[in-house]
Amino acid sequence: MSNTETETETETQNETYVHYHDGGVLGKRRVLKGKAAKPTFDEVPKIDMRRIYSDSLDDRKELAKEVGEACRNVGFFYAVNHGVDEQILDDTFAAVKRFFDLPTEVKMEVHNQKTEKFRGYEAFLEGKLDPSTRGDLKEGFLMGEDATDPSQNLPLSTLPFMSTPRNQWPTHPTALFLRPALTTYHTAMLAFSRRLLSIFALALSLPESHFDPITRHPLTNVRAVHYPPQPSASDVGIGAHTDFCFFTLVCQSRTTYPALEVLNANAIWVPVAYEPDSFVVNIADFLKVVTGGVWRSTVHRVRNWGGEERYSLPFFFSPDEDARVGVVGGFGGEGGGEEVEVGVGEYFQRRLEVDRRTHLEGEGEGDKGGGD
Ligand SMILES: O=C(O)CCC(=O)C(=O)O
Ligand SMILES: [Fe+2]
């Protein structure tokens, strides 16, 4: 089912390509089958995360070894036994379902186009990561770090870009429950992310605290998403893309058919089925930069064609907005010469604007072609 041809694939002289969206530019990858196929993954590995809480450095290093292999070979893994309170996850799903069930006018009070960082409500078909579709068949709500919000318990900051409120919250009496629910989820996922970041550092043979200086006030986002069942095979819940953060943790609701899919090196879509008590973790653009491309910012998409409502709660963890990231020692060259230094805030905002504005304002998009 996951290999069914869609409009995101094109065929030229017996060559089929899968197209994806990679930060404002379109990429493409050739479908390789039979003898032409390269060694690549055909499933997403499951990693038992209990050792993340161990006091023994040896345990954490052993976990880091497994994590490093998954990041190198796949760019995605299931974090099983993550230890984040299941009640918080259940309560968050219940709250977001309740929010998305509210009348459109209640949700549109906090339309994301009202804020520079596109926080708030994103309506159906407003996102359009795959230009060959009518738009992403999803609605969402984006919130994130806000040092001025006492309920987030973040260190207070005098940095100018952190001294103004950043989120939009609905004020309608029927929607007030959303704010505490998403804030609780954000806080829990942030704590887990910090532990995971130290495991990523170990996996890169760095001290656990290596990324601390660039994650003092990290950019973090929760995007609650609702994907209704898609009426047509040519629809997409979210078009093929890479994520523009350090890494993403996705909590997905149970559906019978897998909706999330990741693209392997042969341009075959690999399904990521719902797994109880697990997050799906994926490497994103900044970790690709840090590793010179050795770790993959893997292309993925969502197609919700099993006839059920689907909800997901991606948590995006980025470095500090005022940080610069470049390749860490030892990785230069290994990943194919992708040694670039990136200003986190600029890169993040540029990609956010491409993802959120292009379609609505009718701007064109470049095509970097080539593929990888
Ligand atoms: O809903 C999902 O499972 C993934 C969503 C996603 O890829 C994103 O929001 O970047
Ligand atoms: Fe994504």
Image (cartoon, rainbow, N blue to C red):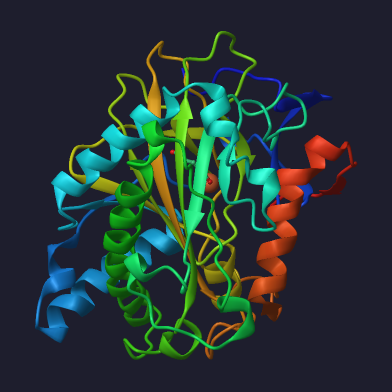
Q: Position of residue 85 (x, y in %)?
A: 15, 53
Q: Position of residue 310 (x, y in %)?
A: 39, 25
Q: Name which residue lies at 19% across and 37% down.
A: 276
Residue placed most toward the observer, 235 or 14: 235
Using the image as rendered, state which of residue 13 and residue 131 is in the foreground.
131
Q: Is residue 256 left or right of residue 241?
A: left
Residue 372: percent from left, percent from top: 69, 52
Image-quadrant location for residue 258: top left
Residue 207 left/right relative to 73: left
Would residue 201 appear left or right of 63 to someone viewing this image? right
Question: Residue 42's quadrant in the figure?
Answer: top left
Instruction: From this view, report whether residue 298 is shown above or below residue 295.
Output: above
The relative height of residue 311 versus residue 329 in the rendered view (above or below) is above
Question: Furthest residue to the left?
Answer: 55
Please report the residue visible at 31 percent of the width from the left and 86 percent of the height from the top.
208
**Badge count:** 0
Residue 284 at least partly seen = yes
Q: Determine the residue positioned at 47% across, 79% down.
A: 217
Residue 326 visible (yes or no): no
213 vs 160, left or right, is left
Q: Residue at x 59, y 9 (%)?
A: 232
Give coordinates of residue 173: x percent, y percent: 39, 35
The outermost residue toward the front is 173
